[in-house]
Image: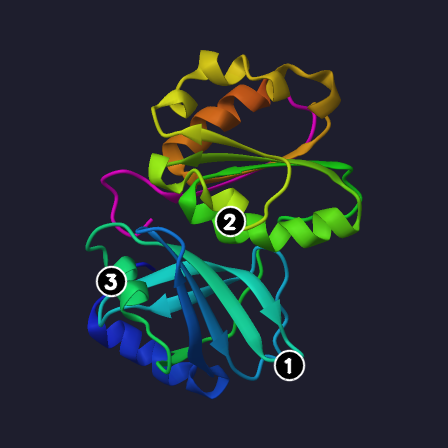
């Protein structure tokens, strides 16, 4: 429910008030003009957060937006988001406005079941909106010695971000429409390689790119394909 009348969100807030958590913004970093890393402190000891867990923020009277948690330390009460700021969209304006000392009330994080420990290989595709997901996956994939590749479709100004975030095994692609081209995707070495045919593919970010990539993989991959378009050009609040 990305958008709804104010009274609907007011009712939900009242119903869920007993479960709500309070966080204080403790640190903000602009990694680029459009990528912001935000750290919060709070009591997260009773909160279960796994890879892909997310929080729904009420970003205005009539809008809610979903953000993936990039890092959590329940012992020390720290939680981190990496958010994409794009124009005057409600979520972007809300996240851009957050500064140190701001108090934010949220409902408990919820999980999205992306991960299967029995799978040997993972490929995660996405864009700026997927950076938090990638960061949440990296330590677990490394710790459990999975083979993995991150494919990231980024604006030119953000090509340095994966290195800044100390990601590993990543390839950066420019946003030039390539991932809307089935033939181009089919020719990618990773798609052609028998070594990666058993991998699990997690496709996120631009819904058009996700759809095209998934269509190609369905004819080539023997592994599980999880697709989750975070946004679509011209579509509000996807």
The mark total stands at 3
- In the rendered structure, which disc, 3 or 2, sits on the residue that comes first in sequence? 3
Q: Is residue 168 left or right of residue 35?
A: right
What x and y, as percent, mark residue 183? 46, 11
The residue singled out by tag 1 in the image is: 45
Residue 127 among magenta residues: no
Q: Nearer the viewer, mark 1 or mark 3?
A: 3
Is disc 3 placed on a helix, strand or loop?
helix
Q: Is residue 199 left or right of residue 216?
A: right
The residue singled out by tag 3 in the image is: 93
Q: Nearer the viewer, mark 2 or mark 1?
A: 2
- In the rendered structure, which disc, 1 or 3, sits on the residue that comes first in sequence? 1
Q: Which residues are magenta?
A: 220-238
Q: Are marks 3 and 2 in contact (CB under 8 Å)?
A: no
Question: Alpha carbon of mark 3 to alpha carbon of mark 2: how far?
Answer: 24 Å
- Residue depicted at x 50% and y 18%: 185
Query: In which quarter of the view is residue 76 placed?
Result: bottom right
- Residue depicted at x 35% and y 23%: 177
What x and y, as percent, mark residue 116? 73, 47
Q: Is residue 46 left or right of residue 211?
A: right
* In the rendered image, the vertical position of residue 186 relative to residue 82, given as above or below: above
* In the rendered image, the vertical position of residue 19 relative to residue 49, given as above or below: below
- Residue depicted at x 47% and y 75%: 40
Q: Are marks 2 and 1 in contact (CB under 8 Å)?
A: no
- In the rendered structure, which disc, 2 or 1, sits on the residue that comes first in sequence? 1
Question: Alpha carbon of mark 2 to alpha carbon of mark 1: how far?
Answer: 29 Å
Q: Which mark is residue 164?
A: 2
Is disc 1 placed on a helix, strand or loop?
loop
Is disc 2 placed on a helix, strand or loop?
helix
What x and y, as percent, mark residue 197? 70, 23
Residue 224 among magenta residues: yes
Question: Alpha carbon of mark 1 to alpha carbon of mark 3: how far?
Answer: 30 Å
């Amino acid at each position: 429910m990305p958008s709804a009348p104010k009274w609907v969100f007011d009712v939900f807030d009242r119903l869920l008030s007993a479960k709500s958590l309070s966080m204080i913004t403790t640190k903000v970093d602009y990694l680029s003009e459009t990528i912001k890393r935000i750290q919060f402190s709070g009591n997260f000891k009773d909160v279960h957060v796994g890879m892909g867990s997310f929080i729904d923020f009420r970003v205005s009277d009539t809008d809610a937006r979903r953000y993936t948690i990039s890092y959590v330390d329940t012992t020390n009460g720290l939680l981190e988001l990496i958010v994409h700021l794009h124009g005057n969209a409600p979520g972007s304006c809300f996240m851009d406005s957050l500064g140190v000392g701001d108090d934010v009330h949220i409902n408990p994080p919820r999980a999205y079941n992306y991960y299967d420990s029995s799978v040997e290989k993972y490929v995660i595709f996405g864009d700026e909106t997927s950076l938090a997901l990638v960061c949440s996956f990296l330590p677990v994939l490394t710790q459990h010695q999975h083979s993995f590749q991150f494919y990231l479709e980024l604006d030119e100004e953000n090509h340095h971000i994966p290195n800044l975030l100390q990601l590993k095994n990543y390839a950066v692609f420019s946003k030039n429409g390539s991932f809307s081209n089935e033939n181009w995707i089919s020719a990618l070495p990773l798609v052609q390689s028998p070594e990666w045919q058993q991998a699990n593919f997690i496709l996120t970010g631009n819904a058009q790119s996700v759809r095209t990539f998934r269509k190609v993989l369905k004819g080539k991959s023997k592994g599980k394909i999880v697709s989750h378009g975070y946004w679509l050009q011209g579509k509000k609040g996807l």
